[in-house]
Amino acid sequence: MNITCNQLDDLLFDAGELAMTTADRHADGCASCREKLDAWKEISDVASSMQTTWKNDMLWPRIERSLRDERSRSVRTWSWQWAAAILLTVALGATAWYALRVRNHEASFDQDILRVSALDDVERAEQVHVEAIAKLERVAEPKLDEASTPLMVSYKEKLMLLDDAIAECQANIEHNRQNAHLRKQLLAMYSEKQQTLRDVLREESTHETH
Amino acid sequence: MSLVLPASDSDRNTDDRQLAAACAAGDTSVFEEIYRRFGDRMKSIAWNHLGNISDAEDVVQEAFLKVHRAAATFTGEASLSTWIYRIVVNTCYDVLRRRRRRIEEAPIDETTETAERTAPNVDDAKRITLRKLLNELPEQRRSVFELFEIEGLSHAEIGEILGITEGNSKWILFATKKELQAKWKRNQ
C-alpha cells in the first residue's frame, strides 16, 4: 500500500503492526519521514528501557510494620470512639436523670406548699367555728343546765351527741391531718353545733316573751 | 497464602474481590502476595513519576496503607492491579504537588541511583534526555506515556487507572509522542 507523507501521522496513531510496516516502507523512500519515524521509534525504545526495578529487602518488612501500626492505630481509634460514645451516653443520661429529678423535686415541693397552705386555711376556718361556738356555749350554758322544757332537754342531748362525735372526729384527724373527708365532717358538725346553740338561745328568748 | 492465577475474567473478578476482602480484613499474607505480584511495577511507576528511590518506596508504602483503608470499597469493576496502580499514580501526584509547593523539583541525579533497568544497553544520555522532556509534560500526558511506553500497559488498563476512556488514552499518547518527537532531535 502506497501512502503520502501526510498520511504518516494516521499510521503512527494507528500504531498497529501493519500500519508500522506500511510507514516503514514509505520512509525507505522519504528522508524526512524516515527522520520522523526513527525519532518516534527511538523514543519508544528508550522509554521501554526505563522500566526500573531495584532490590530492597527492607521495603516489605517496612510496609508490613506500617500496616501493623495502621491496624493497631485503627483499633485504638475505634476503641476510643466507642469509649467516647459510651461516656457521652452516660453523661447525657446522668444529666437527663438529674434534670428530671430536680423538676420532680420542685413539683413535689410546690404541691407540698399548696397542701400546707390549704390545711392552714381549713384549720383557720375550724378555729373561727370553735371560737364562735365557745361564745355561744358561754351564753347558752346556764339555760341548758336548767332545761325546763322537753325541747330544751332534746337540744341538750343533741349537743352532747355532737360533742362526742366532734371529739371522735378530732381524734381521727390527729392520725391523718390531711384527710379532707374528716375535715369536712368536722366542719359540718361545728356548723350543726353552732346552729343548735343559736336555736337554744332563740327558743329561750321566745319562751321568756311568752 | 498461595494464589493460583485466574483462568477467565469472571475468575479474575472473583479472585480480585477475594483478595480485596482479605486486605480489608487485614490479612498480612495477602498484602505480601500483592507485593510479590505487583510490587515491582508499583516501584517502577513511582520511580518514573518521582525520579528517586526513596520517594518511590515511600509512595509504595503509602499506597499499601491506602489499599488497606479502601479495600472494603473495591467493587471489582476494574482489576485489582489497575486499582492499585491508580492509587500509586494518585499518591505520586500528591507527592509532586507537595514538592512543587515546597521547592523547585530537584533534578534527578541518575548516576547516584542504584536502580536497574530492564534494558541496560540503551544509552543513559538518551534516557536522561527523555526523562527531562517527560518532566516538562503535564501530569496526565506524562502518566499516559509512562504507563504505555515504559510499563507496557494497554490503553484499556491506562483508561481504568487514570479515569479516562481507552480512545482518549490512545489520543493523548499520540499527541504526547508527537510533541516529544519534535523536541527529541533538538535535545540530542
Image (tube, coloured by chain):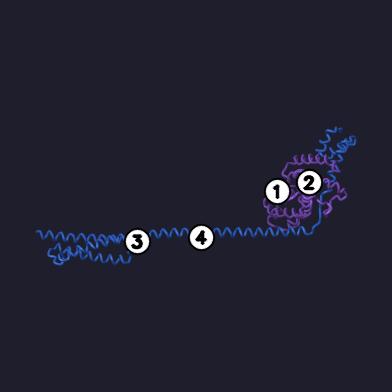
Chain colours: A blue, B purple
Q: Closer to us: mark 2 or mark 3?
A: 2
Element type where label 1 sits in the image: loop
Q: Amino acid at mark 2?
A: Asn
Q: Name the residue beneath numbered marker 3.
A: A116
Mark linked to residue B135 = 2
Q: CA distance from mark 2 to mark 3?
A: 92 Å
Can the viewer see residue A153 in this picture? yes
The quadrant in which the N terminus of chain A is found is: top right
Mark linked to residue A94 = 4
Which of the chains bears the disc numbered 2?
Answer: B
Can the viewer see residue B92 in this picture? no
Q: Name the residue beneath numbered marker 1.
A: B76
Instruction: Give the percent coordinates (x, y) of residue A34.
Output: 88, 37
Label 1 crowd (10 A; few <14 / some 14-19 / many >=20): some
Element type where label 2 sits in the image: helix
- Residue, x 88% and y 49% (percent of image)? B121
Which of the chains bears the disc numbered 3?
Answer: A
